[in-house]
Structure formats: C-alpha cells, structure tokens
C-alpha cells in the first residue's frame, strides 16, 4: 500500500524539518564567537543531532513533494510557492548555518562603508567585533566578490551600524530576495524551454540546498542566481539588452554568472540577429553596466584581480584533492616540483572546464538555458574550489530546462547527498561529530518509517 501523499502532509513534514534544524542551530550552528559552544558540550551535541534530524525530515518532505509534482495531478506553481514560504519561515531568525561566510560579507561591507580597499586588504584591516567573526583563513584575504554585492553589503553596514544581529538578519533578507527572484524566474524559464513549471520550481527553488545554504546560510549566490534568472527571462522575451544588463549585474555579484552573456548572444542569434551584432550589442551593454556599477559602488576595479583569490587549503574540489595527493607523492619522492602540484592541477581543471563548456555549446547544442546550466555545473565541478551550494549554479537552470524526468531525478539524488555533506557549524568534522550527525539522521529515518507504518495500518484494516 502506497504512503498517502498530499501537499498538506509535505508542508507539515518540511516545516517540522526546518523548525527542528533551526532549533538545533541555536547551539550547533555557525554562531558568533562569543556564543560558541565547544563541540563536545552537551548543548552542541544535542543541537547537532537535531540539525541532522531536521535535514533528513526536510529531504523526505521534498522527495514526497517530488512524487506529487510528477503525478498526473501536480500542484500548481502558486501552491508550490506557498510551500517554499512555509518551509523557509523557521529559518528566517535562525543563526547562520553550514558556513561562516555571512560574517565575511558583513566585515567586507563595513570595510567598503569605511572607504577601505576591500580587494587589497582582508577583514583583519577592519578590526573590531565584525572582523573577529571571520574565519582565520580569510582574515588577510581580499574580497572575491564583485562591486554590486559589495555595494549591497556596504549599504547594509551603514544601516545596521555594525550591529551583528541586525547585520545577520539583513543579509538573510538579501538572500531571501534572491531566492524569491529565482522562484519568480523558474516558471517562465521552464515554459520557454518546454519543461514543466511545477517540476522546475520543485527542483530549482524548493530544493534542500536552497533552503539550507541560500536561506539558512545567507549566501550571496542567491542574489547572483536571482538576477541571472531574471536576465534570462528578459532575454527570452523582448528585452535582450535588459537581459544583458541583469546578467552583468549577476556577474558583478559573483563572476560565474558571466557565462549567462553567452546564452544571451545565442538567444539573439536564434532570434534572427547577425552574430556580430548580437555579440557587439551584448558586450556593449555588459561593459556599460560594469562601468556604471563599479562607479556607483566606489570599489574600483580590484575585483578583476580578486578572481585569483586563493582557495581554502582544505577544499575538497576534485582538482584540489588530486593536487594534494600529487604533492604528497612528490614530497615522499623528494621532488622539488611538489609545491607546483596543486597550482598545476588547478590549471588543468580550468582548462578542462573551458573544454567542457565549448563542447556543450558547439557540439551538444542544447537549448540555451539548459546549455548554460550544464556549463555552470561543469565550472563548479572542475574549478579549484567547491562547496555544496556551488552545485546550485547549474542546478537552478537545469531544473528550469531539464529535457526529461530522469534528468531531474538524477540531479535530485545528487542534491540529497550534498545536503548531508556539511556540518551546521561550517567547520571540519571529527569522529564524534560524525557519529552525532549520523545518529540524528538515523533517528529521523526511524520516525519516518514508524509514521509510514502507522499510516498504512488503517488502510490495511479497511482492506481486511
């Protein structure tokens, strides 16, 4: 007998998940330094169990909702929007979860507000309580973000006057705005790509990675993807120049969005514009937007050099893992080439990403939105740094233009794994923390199995 599924059950189960993980984050999240619990403390242990209990409930609710979305009578996009709001609500006032990046955003915004060169100096130059919250590895590293995001962060710093709770809440509102723009763009992108709008919203906006990392983690990838989505919607309509402007603004939040300009050029060419005209007008709109945005932000063009910002030494990107393994082997052999191993593998990864993008556009030639999604996925997978939320760069657009249900299901399976891959504190895991995390997830599975058996019992009784 199948487990009964309706949208109300999915709402309640997902709400329970985000509520429990938000509560667990109060002791196990990426808390301000003065509020940190030691990982071995009873409060932190209970919080960690609670977070993973909630994450598994959320994944289960999302999976059940996916079955409903792919049923003969799927919920409407408006109903799915309501589910997104319900699931996200408990996270609005939760502490930062799964990453400490939001503290870097606040410190960098305060630096810009104080007229410091945020590309030449790290948060240590700012000093004070905000800088103290930034992870040590980034204390002396310049900002890797573009002038649009830094202008937003600077405005927020001015409004909150350096008050940490207000700044964290403000950054979460910025992230929520980005998620709202993503959700608004997805149905239109799906219709233009011949995909199901409800399925696009399920995979691209209600995705656990969106809730865990863009909302709970308050990452600026949300506003990047929101602007990118709106730009593509404009380009697919009758406003290609506006589309180029919006995509450029997205790239001036984080650089990977610049690939969206290639999609706009292709869309213009397919709309009957000569290739040279399509390239020149798109490039002119992008250049004008870049100059204007940089002038308004007042940050200068240091963001170009910031594209080479070093990655975390413990990054688990494929090329970083290969680089560390190669370096260890060369060190054991006594080779002087050992220090070059990681940079060499990073260069190989960049070259492979370029080849993959060219292959996608020139040989596969899928629809532009889908091609852009595949390209961004390749850049994230082969780049020198990777985090679970980087998967959303490509996933957002793959969700909007996936050519089949099987593609969405494979992407959803990857999502489920990535959603469980980071501790709520954002730090590295030890054995004890892994045991607690697994215990929380296992407890959630026991509860779900028990609920499934309880729901089946009345049905079996009536059948008998």
Image: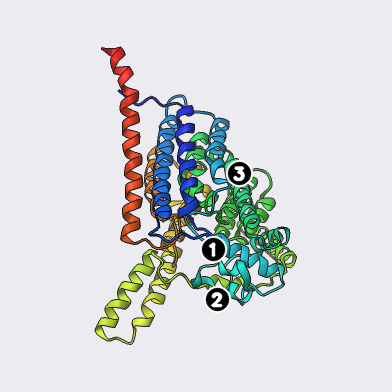
Q: Residue at x 30, y 27 (%)?
A: 453
Residue 283 location in percent, x, y? Answer: 65, 62
Secondary element under disc 2, as helix, strand or loop, is loop
Observer able to see residue 109:
yes
Between the C-alphas of marks 3 and 2, the distance is: 33 Å
Tell me if mark 3 has few (under 14), some (14-19) or many (20+) residues whose alpha carbon lies within 10 angstroms of its own. Answer: some
Of callouts 1 and 3, which one flags the residue occurring earlier in the amino acid sequence? 1
- Residue for badge 2: 140
Q: Nearer the viewer, mark 2 or mark 1?
A: 1
- Within the image, what quadrant is residue 431 found in? bottom left
Q: Residue at x 60, y 49 (%)?
A: 178
- Within the image, what quadrant is residue 86 found in? top right
In front: 256, or 460?
460
Residue 230 location in percent, x, y? Answer: 63, 47
Q: Which quadrant would the C terminus be assigned to in this image?
A: top left
- Residue for badge 1: 34
Image-based side of 208 in relation to 1, left or right? right
Residue 78 location in percent, x, y? Answer: 58, 31
Q: Nearer the viewer, mark 1 or mark 3?
A: 1
Between the C-alphas of marks 1 and 3, the distance is: 32 Å
Secondary element under disc 3, as helix, strand or loop, is helix
Tell me if mark 1 has few (under 14), some (14-19) or many (20+) residues whose alpha carbon lies within 10 angstroms of its own. Answer: few
Secondary element under disc 1, as helix, strand or loop, is helix
Q: Is residue 357 above or below residue 79?
A: below
- Residue for badge 3: 180
Residue 270 location in percent, x, y? Answer: 58, 48
Image-based side of 369 in relation to 236, left or right? left
Q: Is residue 184 above or below residue 163?
A: above
Between the C-alphas of marks 2 and 1, the distance is: 21 Å
Image-based side of 101 in relation to 326, left or right? right
């Amino acid at each position: 007998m199948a487990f009964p599924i309706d949208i109300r059950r999915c709402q309640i189960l997902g709400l329970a998940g985000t509520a429990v993980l938000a509560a667990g984050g109060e002791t196990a999240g990426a808390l301000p330094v003065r509020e940190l619990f030691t990982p071995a403390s009873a409060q932190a242990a209970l919080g960690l169990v609670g977070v993973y209990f909630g994450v598994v409930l959320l994944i289960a609710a999302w999976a059940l909702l996916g079955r409903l979305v792919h049923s003969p009578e799927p919920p409407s996009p408006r109903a799915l929007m309501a589910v997104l709001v319900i699931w996200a609500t408990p996270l609005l006032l939760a502490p930062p979860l799964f990453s400490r990046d939001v503290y870097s955003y606040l410190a960098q915004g305060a630096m810009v507000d104080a007229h410091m060169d945020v590309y030449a100096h790290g948060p240590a130059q700012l000093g004070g309580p905000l800088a103290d919250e930034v992870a040590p590895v980034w204390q002396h590293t310049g900002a890797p973000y573009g002038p649009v995001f830094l202008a937003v962060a600077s405005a927020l710093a001015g409004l909150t006057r350096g008050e940490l709770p207000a700044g964290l809440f403000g950054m979460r509102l910025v992230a929520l705005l980005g998620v709202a723009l993503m959700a608004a763009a997805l149905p239109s992108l799906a219709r233009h790509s011949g995909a199901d709008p409800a399925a696009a919203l399920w995979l691209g906006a209600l995705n656990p990675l969106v809730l865990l990392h863009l909302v709970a983690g308050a990452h600026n990838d949300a506003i990047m993807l929101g602007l990118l989505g709106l730009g593509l919607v404009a380009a697919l309509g009758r406003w290609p120049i506006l589309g180029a402007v919006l995509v450029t603004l997205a790239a001036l939040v984080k650089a990977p969005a610049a690939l969206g300009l290639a999609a706009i050029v292709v869309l213009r060419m397919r709309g009957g514009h000569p290739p040279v005209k399509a390239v020149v007008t798109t490039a002119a709109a992008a250049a004008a937007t870049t100059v204007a945005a940089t002038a308004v932000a007042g940050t200068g063009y240091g963001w170009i050099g910031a594209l080479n910002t070093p990655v975390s030494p413990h990054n688990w990107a494929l090329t970083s893992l290969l680089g560390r393994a190669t370096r260890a082997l060369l060190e054991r052999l006594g080779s002087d080439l050992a220090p070059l191993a990681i940079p060499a593998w990073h260069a190989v990864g960049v070259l492979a990403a370029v080849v993959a993008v060219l292959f996608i556009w020139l040989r596969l030639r899928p629809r532009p939105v889908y091609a852009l999604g595949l390209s961004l996925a390749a850049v994230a997978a082969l780049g020198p740094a990777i985090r679970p939320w980087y998967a959303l760069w490509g996933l957002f657009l793959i969700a909007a233009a996936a050519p089949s249900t099987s593609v969405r299901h494979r992407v959803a399976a990857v999502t489920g794994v990535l959603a469980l891959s980071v501790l709520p504190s954002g730090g590295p895991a030890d054995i004890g923390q892994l045991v607690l995390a697994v215990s929380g997830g296992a407890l959630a599975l026991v509860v779900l199995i028990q609920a499934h058996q309880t729901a089946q019992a009345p049905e079996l009784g009536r059948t008998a």
